[in-house]
Image (cartoon, rainbow, N blue to C red):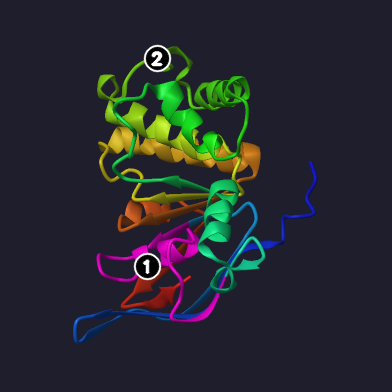
Amino acid sequence: MDNTNESKDVVRLENVIKTYVMGETEVHALRGISFSIKSGEFVSIMGPSGSGKSTCMNMIGCLDRPTSGLVEINGREISLMNEKELAALRNRTIGFVFQQYHLITSMNVLENVMLPLKYQRLERSERMRRAEKALQAVGLSERLHHRPHELSGGQKQRVAIARAMVTEPKILLADEPTGALDSETGVQVMDLFRQINRERGTTVIIVTHDPRIGESTRRCIRILDGKIEDD
């Protein structure tokens, strides 16, 4: 296995400030945050509601830009990129997993997982092959033609993880991925993230308010009031 990328920063935030103007009020979501995450790390970003962790996730996910400071994803500074370039970076570099799964109810499991590959202009047969492989990796080979409403919460989240991994992203970014699951299923989903990190070398970043999730990752960046409290 090639280890040349092991020490490369895939995420770098340097003195990032994010201020939202809401009417006449300024909300200081991030107040000068700096950290970097290396390729292949397994990290949680933890903090209570309103701490700035979601804003931090939006920066890493190229969903928002800083008011000031530097955000670099896979060596590219997001402030210098236009919307089309940001969309391409998101599609090829980052896989997203959300608390509420965001599966399309009118599509079956296989079609949901194939969806991100549509933007890569691959042949349908190749999209199907990759989606089937991703679903096999999360243990759902026998559920390809089921609709989301026929699945349990844990199975839906596995589909969401397969969909996030089907583009073979460098970064897997998960927002409260166990928040809608019971504790036992949550442990199984966390084990799946660990397996993906270990076997594929994918950088896994989990945004959470749950201390148990924070304690179960190799590194935990704690955010409070828009600043890093502990790393």
Q: Amino acid at mark 2?
A: His
Asked if residue 53 is among those painted magenta in the image, a careful observer would answer yes
Q: Position of residue 111 (x, y in %)?
A: 44, 25
Query: Circle 1 sits in a helix, a strand or a loop, which is it?
Result: helix
Q: Which residues are magenta?
A: 44-71
| Viewer-nearest residue: 100 or 26 | 26
Tally of numbered tags: 2
Task: List the residue tagged with mark 2.
Answer: 145
**Which residue is pictured at 19% across the width and 82% down the height?**
23
Against 133, residue 216 (above or below) is: below
**Which residue is pictured at 40% across the width and 68% down the height?**
222
In this rendering, position of residue 134 left or right of residue 8: left
Dot 2: within a 10 Å radius of its alpha carbon, few (fewer than 14), some, or many (20 or more) residues? Answer: few
Q: Position of residue 114 (x, y in %)?
A: 50, 29
- Cα separation, mark 2 vs mark 1, equals 36 Å
| Viewer-nearest residue: 48 or 165 | 165
Asked if residue 70 is among those painted magenta in the image, a careful observer would answer yes
Against 198, residue 224 (above or below) is: below
Image mark for residue 19? none
- In the figure, residue 103 lies in which quadrant? top left
Against 140, residue 221 (above or below) is: below
In this rendering, position of residue 90 left or right of residue 76: left
Image mark for residue 55? 1
Res. 231 visible in picture: yes
| Viewer-nearest residue: 177 or 108 | 108
Res. 188 visible in picture: no
Q: Position of residue 11 (x, y in %)?
A: 58, 64
**Which residue is pictured at 38% across the width and 71% down the height?**
223
Q: Position of residue 192 (x, y in %)?
A: 48, 35
Q: Quadrant of the N terminus?
A: top right
Q: Nearer the viewer, mark 2 or mark 1?
A: 2
Dot 1: within a 10 Å radius of its alpha carbon, few (fewer than 14), some, or many (20 or more) residues? Answer: some
